[in-house]
Image (cartoon, rainbow, N blue to C red):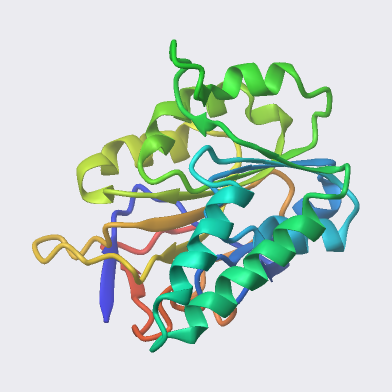
Amino acid sequence: MLGKLPIGLKYLTANDLIRVGKDFDGGYLISQSDLYETEVILGFGMNDDWSFEQQFSQEKSIDVNIFDGSVSLKYFVINAFKSLIRIDRPAYFYHWVKVIINYLIFFRQEKNKHIRKYIGNQTKSGNYLDLNSIMEQISSDKVFLKIDIEGSEYRILDTIKKYEKRFTGIVIEFHDCDIHINKLISFVNDLNMKLVHIHANTHSEIISETGLPCTLELTLSKGAECLPHCDLPHKLDMPNNKHHEEIRLKFDQVYET
């Protein structure tokens, strides 16, 4: 399957890309040099998978702060009990049991925190935090951002630009790219960070008129050494949905380095 990218997404390949996180959905390619430089990781969006932050912290001892107001230990336990009803699908029950055990072990460590708040604009309900208020509470200037918040990423792009000097690297999953492609391109080109990897999320569709994938995963780096862009997907990439084939990506016009 072939997807097309606009030439405005200037892309170079980091020469030290590694895969962090579990196979298929949940894993991302980042620069190893950024991992080594990081002191704090902010994960926006978790659901039942924090394998990226978990493996990241296993590679280097860092503070892990994951923000997601939609899940909790109680949520996982309820889903485990609900899955008992589905006698024909025991894998669901075992999945939630593994999630519960992993949650208890990982977040029992003092340096790993799950903050039950959504990311976006501050609201009167108090259920949301904005990136500005979070960054004001962090003293480190070596912060890695991982963002998968189902469309709310566009709300915090300006704040990311404001604090970009404090980020070692960023992974962002951009949703509804067909609607917001100009915002995406503007964001990437306004940053002084390097766009070092692009992956099309295989859970989403490709727009028939333009060939643009609806969901793109972008990796930005502060310190990576880069080479001319390679064919996409990268050899370390995996389809998000293991039942779908990878989406090959081509630019409408080759970006000259």
Q: Position of residue 220 (x, y in %)?
A: 58, 48
Q: Residue at x 55, y 65 (%)?
A: 26
Q: Residue at x 58, y 24 (%)?
A: 131
Splitting the image into 4 quarters, where does residue 215 fall? bottom left
Give the side of residue 96 with respect to residue 35, left or right: left
The answer to whether one can see residue 79 in this image is yes
Give the side of residue 88 with respect to residue 12, left or right: left
- Residue 255 in the image: above or below residue 18: above
Splitting the image into 4 quarters, where does residue 3 fall? bottom left
Q: Position of residue 91 (x, y in %)?
A: 50, 84
Give the side of residue 164 with respect to residue 35, left or right: left
Q: Residue at x 87, y 49 (%)?
A: 109
Give the camera-side residue of 186 and 174: 174
Give the camera-side residue of 93 and 173: 93
- Residue 140 in the image: above or below residue 60: above
Give the camera-side residue of 207 and 8: 207
Q: Residue at the top extreme? A: 124
The answer to whether one can see residue 232 in this image is no
Total tally of numbered discs in the picture: 0
Q: Quadrant of the N terminus?
A: bottom left
Q: Residue at x 60, y 18 (%)?
A: 132
- Residue 22 in the image: above or below residue 102: below
Q: Residue at the left extreme? A: 209
- Residue 231 in the image: above or below residue 133: below
Give the side of residue 256 with respect to residue 44, left or right: left
Q: Position of residue 240 (x, y in %)?
A: 44, 73
Q: Position of residue 67 (x, y in %)?
A: 60, 38
